[in-house]
Every structure is written in structure tokens, then in C-alpha cells.
Image: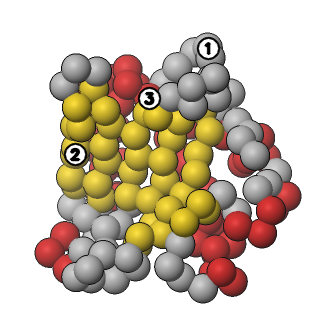
Amino acid sequence: MRVSLNEFMADFENQRGKYFGFYDWFCKETSLRKRAMAFLPKLRFLLDMKILNGDTTYVWFKNNCPMDGELYDDMRFSLLDEEDTYLGGIAPSLGYSISKGKCNAWFILPNIGLKQFEFKSWSTFKNELKRDAKLLEEFQNHFYRKEN
């Protein structure tokens, strides 16, 4: 069931059944709650920075298993519209051996395709958004939608 990001955050414990927003995972099912809870402050930051609109956007999580590395989680965002318009996602800490711990963000640009950003860490990503108005504006322009 799709619910707005604001609804998900307000009633986290009761949203999306026992999977806590995960749609795919390789970890133990019993660890999904803890993994999802780790996203809550990150989602709050994205809402506070006006990168995501909590009323028009929904989130889902994926637990990834790279061929070379450790399990890691990402969060993906779509609009609550009839097409479930996919906006992109963020992996706060990659698990690939070559990129371990780096933060990766991506979105799809019409007629161009995938645009990716890589940062040393989630903390670096946050600091760059606070420091670099142009980068913040790029994320806001892509992810933040006022109406469905």
C-alpha cells in the first residue's frame, strides 16, 4: 500500500506491515525494522531541506546484495500519482568493496537518462547540500513536487 512520506513518518510502526517499507531484501526479515529506522533521520533531513515533499512523494526501501561487497540499503522515491512516477533514490552507504561507505544519489532526467552523484559519505552529502546552493537547487528541482 502506498502512503505519503508524511504518513509513513508519522505512523512508522504501523505502515506497510511487517516489512517496514522494504520491497526486496537479502537480510533477515527480523532486521528490516532496524534498517528502516536508520532511514528516518535521513528522510527527515530530506524533508527539512525541501528536497522531498512529504505530501506528494512516497518512499520504499531496498536491501541490496552486491557480488563484491556487503549488504547495503537504499531508499527510492516516487510520486503519489496515477503513474507512480519514479523520481530516483539515495543509497546513504554503499556496500560495494570498491565504493564501500560512499553515498550515492541518482535520478532520471527526461531525454537524458540516469544522472548519478557520489559523495564520500552521507555526512558529506548533507554538508554539500547545505554548502552548495546550486546542488541543493538541482535536487529540489528534480525531487520536490508541489502537486500530484
Q: Residues within 10 Å of mark 1 (few under 14, many from 20)?
A: few
The reply, left or right, for residue 127 in relation to residue 111 is: right
Q: Which residue is mark 3?
A: 143
* Relative to 101, 50 lies left or right: right
Which is more N-terminal, label 1 or label 2?
2
The residues tagged by marks 1 and 3 sit, at their Cα atoms, a distance apart of 12 Å
Three-letter amino acid code at the position of disc 3: Phe
Q: Determine if residue 50 is in view.
A: no
- The earlier-in-sequence mark between 3 and 2 is 2
Q: CA distance from mark 3 to mark 2?
A: 14 Å
Q: How many residues crowd around disc 3 within 10 Å: few (fewer than 14), some, or many (20 or more)?
A: many
Contact (Cβ within 8 Å) of mark 2 with mark 1: no
Observer-nearest of 65 and 141: 65
Q: Residue at x 19, y 70 (%)?
A: 99
Relative to 25, is 109 above or below? Answer: above
Per the image, label 1 sits on a secondary structure element best described as loop
- In percent of the image, x 57 and y 15: which residue is there? 146
Viewer-nearest residue: 131 or 89 = 89
- What colouring style does the render use? secondary structure
> From this viewpoint, which residue is outermost toward the top?
147
Other-residue count near label 2 (Cα within 10 Å), few / some / many at <14 / 14–19 / ≥20 = few
Q: Position of residue 128 (x, y in %)?
A: 26, 43
Q: In the rendering, at what x and y percent does residue 105 appear?
A: 31, 47
* In the image, farthest residue toward the left: 98
- Give the residue pinned by disc 2: 117
* Rendered location of residue 11, percent (x, y): 82, 51
Q: CA distance from mark 2 to mark 1?
A: 26 Å
**Residue identifier under label 1:** 147
Amino acid at circle 1: Glu
Q: Which mark is residue 127?
A: none
Image quadrant assignment for residue 31? bottom right
